[in-house]
Amino acid sequence: MTTRDTQHRTDQDTRVTQNTEAVWNTETEKVLTKLKEYALGPMRFMNLLSCFELGIVDVLRAEGPRTAVEIAERVGGAPAAIEQLLLLPVKDEFLSQDERGRYELAGLAHPSAADLGRVLPWMDMIKVICLRQLYWLTDSVRTGTVVGLKELYGHEGTLYSATAANDDLRASWSAMMDSVTDYIDGWFFANLQVRPGARILDLAGNTGLGAVLTRKYKAEADPAVVCFDFPEKEAAALATFAAHGESERCGFIGGDVFDGVPEGFDLVLIKHFLDMFDKDNVLRILRNVHAALEPGGEVCVLVPSHPEHLADTSSVDFFPAYFLGCTMGEGGPQKVSTYAAWAREAGFEVTTAISQDVASMPPDMVPMHGIIVGRKN
Ligand SMILES: C[S@@+](CC[C@H](N)C(=O)[O-])C[C@H]1O[C@@H](n2cnc3c(N)ncnc32)[C@H](O)[C@@H]1O
């Protein structure tokens, strides 16, 4: 009797018959299939992104059905290479191929320009910022630093300091960040109460867009908004204010949040920032904000968060690797309940702790945001 026969006789839930070469029970089969999907992810990703980058999708959208030869004439490359590249999108029904060998948009005809305007910046950011740096994810986890930035750019620090000197990182990251901000702001400001004439600090406000948007969404309250970020962001922030005609009611203060938070504000916004840090640093930030506020002052946190039930979103598929290997060497989202608990630990009374309704999110959307509002009593 062979080993295989023995295995087959003893394995109750085996579904493969004795005359096949190999035998796996259903649990093993499930895991091996999942491992294959993981292994194929990066390959599928770049195959499809290349179709966009080469302009194939644009050509098919603008000009209708085209053969590989015609596509190659328009976008470059050999017709044989184009044929190879288009096998996967045809298999996955993004494209179709007719009996004359012409390709046309199939599934990809459905998403609107706005839909693709969300998806493509994400894909570009994953290519530019994640794919290469994640080669060193294991080393990043071991060292608590972004090893990929050191290896690729000679940069010792975080993605956010690396963007200052590297246009490719800055352009790709900013396009993704702007698209996320664009998408989430309606929900965020609908849940934000602002008193008339309030003085607002947009902590880690980057290049001032958040300050301008606060003025736009809360125009009736006519708040004065100051963007606080590293000093090197000042010129870009002032340019943003000028470009939006907001120089009078928007300002900039340069500094490092770990050295202290400017005083004199009624409300501190912290958007897309706490998720960059581990608990100790989140508490340092929240305590510095607490110390800077007068009693009655509030903090309002907008943060990508993991759902209470991890399988409800793709948050854990993306963010742990992103923060550990691509941007910070630490951090990663927490559940809203965890952020609320940390805000209490920092001295705040938590008055709001809500999550986005997953069902209302576009199907391509990765971050699920939470809002936590705390009051200093
Ligand atoms: C993910 S971005 C968020 C930008 C903005 N709040 C938004 O929602 O679009 C993080 C910002 O934090 C800033 N930052 C990082 N560490 C900081 C620190 N220690 N002190 C002040 N700003 C910091 C970065 O320069 C960057 O602009």
Image: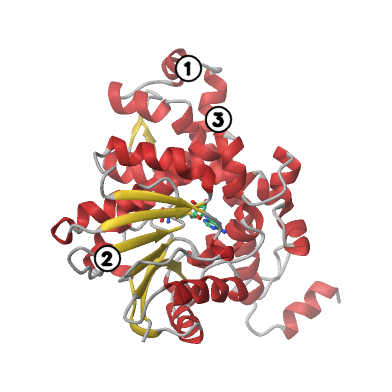
> Between residues 204 and 296, which one lies in front from this camera angle?
296
Judge: label 2 CB < 8 Å from ligand 1: no
Query: In the image, is 158 to the left or to the right of 305?
Result: right
Local crowd at mark 3 within 10 Å, few (<14), some, or many (≥20)? few
Label 1 vs label 3, nearer the camera: 1
Q: CA distance from mark 1 to mark 2?
A: 40 Å
Q: Which label number is shown at residue 72? A: 1
> Between residues 86 and 311, which one lies in front from this camera angle?
311
Quarter of the image for the N terminus: give it.
Answer: bottom right
Q: Position of residue 359 (x, y in %)?
A: 29, 68
* Type of amino acid at the residue the image marks with label 2: Ser
* Type of amino acid at the residue the image marks with label 1: Ala
Extreme residue in the front direction? 264
Query: In the image, is 246 to the left or to the right of 121?
Result: left
- Residue bearing mark 3: 84
Q: CA distance from mark 3 to mark 2?
A: 37 Å
Q: Which badge, 1 or 2, comes first in the chain's sequence?
A: 1
- Residue bearing mark 2: 360
Residue at the spot 42% in from the left edge and 83% down from the top edge? 348
